[in-house]
Amino acid sequence: MAQSGGRKKIQPHIVEEWTGKIYASFCIVLLVVTIFSMVYYVATKGLSTFLQDGIALGEVFGSTNWKPDGEPPVFGALPFILGSFSTSILAALIAAPLGICAALFMVEIMPKFGKKYLQPVIELLAGIPSVVYGFVGLSVIVPFYRDIFPGQGLGILAGATVLSIMILPTITSIATDALAALPPGLKEGSYALGATRWQTLSRTVLPTTMPALLTGVVLGMARAFGEALAVQMVIGNAPHIPRSLFESTSTLTSVITLSMGNTVMGSMQNNVLWTLALILMLMTFVFVFIVRWLERRAKR
């Protein structure tokens, strides 16, 4: 006969369940604290430019002069902002048609050949380091543009070309998943109505999967916007607004990586660089919100 006052033995599955809940809760709290800490730190450092140093918003976002060593110093970040946007948008315009057409080829036209040969090659591009892309761009793309177009080959077009190759796997992978998830009855119904393959792809498949395809393009732009080393090697790093695609310019990431190590923490130039980092972080949030909006639109 069991003793009535004895302790009840805790079941092993209850211990495992509580252990899993505690571990998962700790990871979630750690992740949230880390993200908010990063946002708070970058925001406080970035806002120091305006709150402590007294630099006007118009000088940073509206001026084209970047002279941190001048008397007085001038910190016009407009060339870097325009350089980041121009290279990212141009890279997306180059990579989006290539990625979507590659996904159509792998899913709709020749699925066996595409998935066996083309998809592994495209996915291999995602594992190549950024410095390799930059070195190839500096050794191949820049001389190619220099021999054909006016200028030294360094500039927005060279940077956008390198970025387009880097974001191609992202756009292609998301487009491939979106096309593969399309219900087969949708295409069969189009064929049953007498539509050709091209009519089915252009009028049924692409419009249906457009939100998911745009999601891939936006994610590719987000990566291109934050890329530093590869663009820095081929864009020229000149702090001015170019008049053509073949003139040198600079981006937010380039000026941060080139100048941050040469500044003193807490100095005016260092605070301005943190302001540029804050702009990068805010643009990342904008890209995330756009992706979420496209995902909600795709579910309707």
Image (cartoon, rainbow, N blue to C red):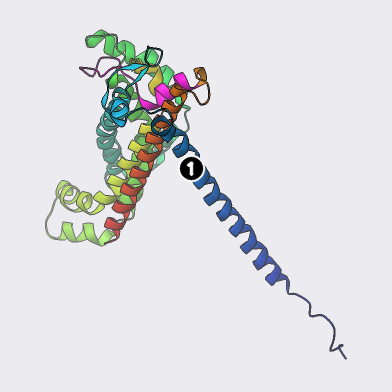
Camera sees residue 114 = no
The secondary element bearing badge 1 is classed as helix
Left/right of residue 82 with respect to residue 3 in the rendered view: left
The x, y position of residue 43, in whole percent, is: 44, 39
Which of the two residues, 47 or 5, is positioned nearer the viewer here? 47
Q: Which residues are the magenta region?
A: 240-260
The x, y position of residue 8, in whole percent, is: 79, 80
The x, y position of residue 160, in whole percent, is: 30, 25
Left/right of residue 27 with respect to residue 214 in the rendered view: right
Quadrant placement of the C terminus: bottom left
Indicate yes or no whether the magenta region holds residue 241.
Answer: yes
Indicate yes or no whether the magenta region holds residue 293.
Answer: no
Which of the two residues, 158 or 44, is positioned nearer the viewer here? 44
The x, y position of residue 124, in whole percent, is: 45, 33
Quadrant placement of the N terminus: bottom right
Amino acid at pointer 1:
Tyr
Left/right of residue 270 with respect to residue 251 in the rendered view: right
Residue 278 found in image quarter: top left
Q: Residue at x 73, y 74 (%)?
A: 11
Camera sees residue 292 = yes
Task: From the image, tell me which residue sits under label 1.
Answer: 40
From this view, report whether residue 88 is shown above or below residue 199.
above
Which of the two residues, 122 or 237, is positioned nearer the viewer here? 237
From this view, report whether residue 234 is shown above or below residue 227.
above
Mark 1 crowdedness (10 Å alpha carbons): few <14, some 14-19, many ≥20 = few
